[in-house]
Amino acid sequence: MRRRSLGVALAALAALITLPVHAPSAAAAETPLSQGKAATSSSTENGGTPAAFAVDGDTGTRWSSAATDSQWLQVDLGASASVNKVVLNWEAAYGKDYKVQISSDGNSWTDLKSVTGGDGGIDTLDVSGQGRYVRMYGVHRATQYGYSLWEFQVFGTAGGNDGGGSTGSCDSANAAKGRPASASSTENAGTPASAAFDGDTGTRWSSAASDPQWVQVDLGSVQNLCKVDLNWEAAYGKDFQIQASADGSSWTTLKSVTGATGGTASYDVSGSGRYVRVNGTARGTGYGYSLWEVAVHTTSSGTTGPVQGGGDLGPNVIVVDPSTPNLQQKFDQVFAQQESNQFGSGRYQFLLKPGTYNGINAQIGFYTSISGLGLNPDDTQINGDVTVDAGWFNGNATQNFWRSAENLAITPSNGTDRWAVAQAAPFRRIHVKGGLNLAPNGYGWASGGYIADSKIDGTVGPYSQQQWYTRDSSVGGWTNGVWNMTFSGVQGAPATNFDTGPYTTLDNTPVSREKPFLYLDGNAYKVFVPAKRTNARGVSWPANAGTSLPLDQFYVVKPGATAATINQALSQGLNLLFTPGVYHLDQTINVTRANTVVLGLGLATIVPDHGVDAMHVADVDGVKLAGFLIDAGATNSDTLLQIGAPGSTADHSANPTTMQDVFVRIGGAGPGLATNSVVVNSNNVIIDHTWLWRADHGDGVGWETNRADYGLRVNGNDVLATGLFVEHFNKYDVYWAGERGRTIFFQNEKAYDVPNAAAVTHDGIVGYAAYKVADTVNQHEAWGLGSYCNFTADPSIVQHHGFQVPVKSGVKLHDIQVISLGGKGQYAHVVNDTGAPTSGTDTVPSKVTLFP
C-alpha cells in the first residue's frame, strides 16, 4: 500500500464521504456506453485498483495508475459509437493535463479534448467523435501519486459507419430461460433458484430472510446485454444491483436500483457477460427476496455468435507422411529461413503422421517444432536425424533458443543424434535408438537444456554443456558435464558427486504430469492430456494414463485472432490450441474454467499491447498451459502471466495446474517492459521447464529500456518447479514467499548490464539474490542450483551472494554454486554469508553442498 500525507488522505476521505455510494439513477438514454465494458490501462497501482473499476458504475471503487506521467485508461465500447460527452470523476490523485481521445482500432488515436490546468473533482466534457475505443491519456499529474478515477463515463449513441459494427437491436427473447441458475440461499426446497428462470410465472425463487442475497444465471457464453426484466413476488428487493460477469467471480454493476417498490420492472443495461445476477442489498419486507421470473435480453448483433471449435490447423503447420514428396526439401526450406532468425516473426510446426521416414535430416532452427502424431513415440520412426547445431553462430550453441522436438523415435544415421541447444529448447517424449550428443560440432560453448519422458538407448554426451536437467527418463549412460547436471526419476543416471563433479541425482520426481500433445486417432486430431504421476521414475509411455480431447473442444487460434474472440471461446468452455504465429492482445486472456488446456504449436507467441497483462488463470483445478512464448510489449505490463488471483487459498493437490514449456521474453525483439514475468498465487502448481528471460542482446536492450524487476514470484503453497531457468532481471530473479516450495534444478545469470553497484544495493546488500526465499517462509527445499555473474557494464561489482534464505530447520538447499564468468564481477558468498568467494578470472564454481 502506498503511503500518503495526512492532507491527501483526508482529502480522499472527504471525497468518499461526499460522493454517493451508488451511481445516481438515470434514464436508459443516460446510461453510459462505457459502463461494464472491457477496460484496460497502461498500469495499475495495485491489484485493488484495476481498470475495470473505473467503468463499473460504482463510485466507491476506482482505477489508479503507477506514479508516473504518460499513463492512460481505455474502454472498449464493443462497437462503434457517436460519442458526445465524457465525464471523469477524479479521486484525490487527479490529472492536471490530460487528453480524451477516440479510436476505431485501439491503435490510432484522435484527440477529442485537451485539458490543461485541471483541478480534479468531476470534469464533464462535451465532445464529438466516432469510434469504438475511448481513453483518458494523462500528460502531467497534479500530485506525486498516479492518476486515479472513481468513474470514467462515455455517453453517446451506439452505432456508426467507421467499420466497428453496431450494437444491434435488443432481442425480445429471454436468453436466461432454462439456463443453469444458483443463489446465495433458498427459503426452502420448493423455491429453488431455477424457478426464477423457467419461464413459469407460477413458480418462484425465494431467499433466506437476511441481507445481502443474490440469484444468478449462466447464459452459457459471453453475451452483449441490453435489458433485464424482474417480476417480484410480494417479498421484493428495495435496493439491489443488476450485475454481469465473464467468469462468475469478478462482477460489474450494470444498474444500481434504490427505493424500488416491487412488482414488474424492466431495466435497460449496457454491458456484457456470461453470468447475470440480481444482488439484493436491502429487502422491502421482513421476508427474504422472491422473484417469480428474471428475463435477460441480449443484442441480436455486436457478436458473431458462438466461437466454433475444431477446423484446420492453419498456414504454418506442415503435416507430412512418409510418402510426402520432396520432404527433405520442406525441412531444408524452413531451416534456411529460421536457422539464424533469432528475433523474427516466422513460426513453424512440423507434424509427422505415424509411419517410417527414411534418410531424412530435419535440422531445427528458431521457432520451429517437430512432433510425431502417434499416441506413442515409436509410432513415428525416423531413420535419420533430428539435428540442432551451431554453424550459424560459429560453433557457439549458447543462443540456440526457442525450438522443440517431441513424440518421435530416432535411429541416428551415424549412431548418435546431435541436439546442441541452449534454453527454451525442450526434448520431450523421444526414443533415441542410439546415442545423443548435446554439444555443437567442434565442442564449442553450449548452455542448455532439458529432457523429459525420453528414452536414450545409448550414451548421452553433454561435453561442453554447462548445465542440463533430465526428468522421468532412461539413459544408457551419461559421460560428463561442466557445472550442473541434475536428474530426477532418471533410470541409468549417474550417482550424485557434487562435491567433486557436476551431478545431482534424485531417484524420482515427487510430482509430475507430462505435457499435453496433439495426435491422430485414425483421421481425427485429438489432444492427449497425460495423468498426474507421483514419485515417477522412467518414461510414462506406452502405458499412457490420461484422457483424450477431440479437436472440436478446442478453439484453433490462428494469426489474426483477437483477444475478445479468444476470451469468448474460453467463456463458452472451449480449450485453446494456438497455431504458430505472433498474437497481439489488447486485453488479457482470462482462463477461468477448471481443466482448461492452453496448448501452443511452433512456439506460438503472445504479445500484450498497451500495458495489459498477457494471461490470468483463475484459482481452479487442473489448468494445463504448455508450449508458447509470452513476449512483453513496449508499454509496461504489471504481470505477464498470473496463475491464481492474489490471496488464493484452494487446495489443488489432487489436480494441480501445470505450466510446461511456457517461456517469457522481455526485450530482444524490441523494447519490452514488465514488472513481473510470472506470478504464481495458486497452491500446488507445477512449473515444469520454463525460461524467463530479460534479454541481454537483440533490439530494445538496456537497464531501463527493457526493465523487468522480477522473473518468478511464488506466493502459493506447495508449488514445485522442475527445470527452472530465470535470467537477467533487474531485481530478484526468483522470489519465493509460499510455504513448502520445492525446486529441482535452477539455472541463472544475473543481469549483465547493471550500471554500477549502487543500482542494485538494497538493505545494505550489494546485489539482489538470484533466488530468494522470503524471511517469513518456514519450509522450503531445493536441489541443483547455479547462479552466474557477467557484469559487463561494471566488472568491479562484487555481488554479496547468489542465494538468500531464512536460516530455519525447514529450509534446505542442496548442491548450490555461484560462478564468475571470466572475472567480470564476483560473488562474495554462495548463500547468505556462507561459501567461498569466486576466484578472480578463473571460471570455477564456488560450491555449498548443503545449507544450512
Image (cartoon, helix red, strand yellow):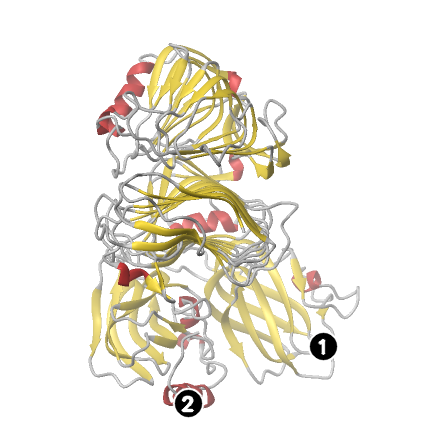
Percent coordinates x, y for residue 585 in the rendering: 35, 51
Residue 98 seen in render: yes
Residue at left offset 45%, top offset 65%: 271
Residue at left offset 50%, top offset 39%: 554
Dot 1 or dot 2: first in sequence order is 2
Q: Is residue 418 left or right of residue 635?
A: right
Residue 826 vs 518, above or below: the answer is below
Quadrant assignment, res 62: bottom left
Residue 274 vs 533, above or below: the answer is below
Residue 810 vs 458, above or below: the answer is below
Quadrant assignment, res 83: bottom left
Quadrant assignment, res 402: top left
**Depth check, front residue: 589 or 231:** 589
Q: Are marks 1 and 2 in contact (CB under 8 Å)?
A: no
**Depth check, front residue: 363 or 389:** 389
Task: Report which residue position mark 1 lands on.
Answer: 288
Q: Is residue 489 left or right of residue 67?
A: right
* Callout 2 crowding tier (Cα within 10 Å): few <14, some 14–19, many ≥20: few
Task: Report which residue position mark 2 lands on.
Answer: 10
Label total for image: 2
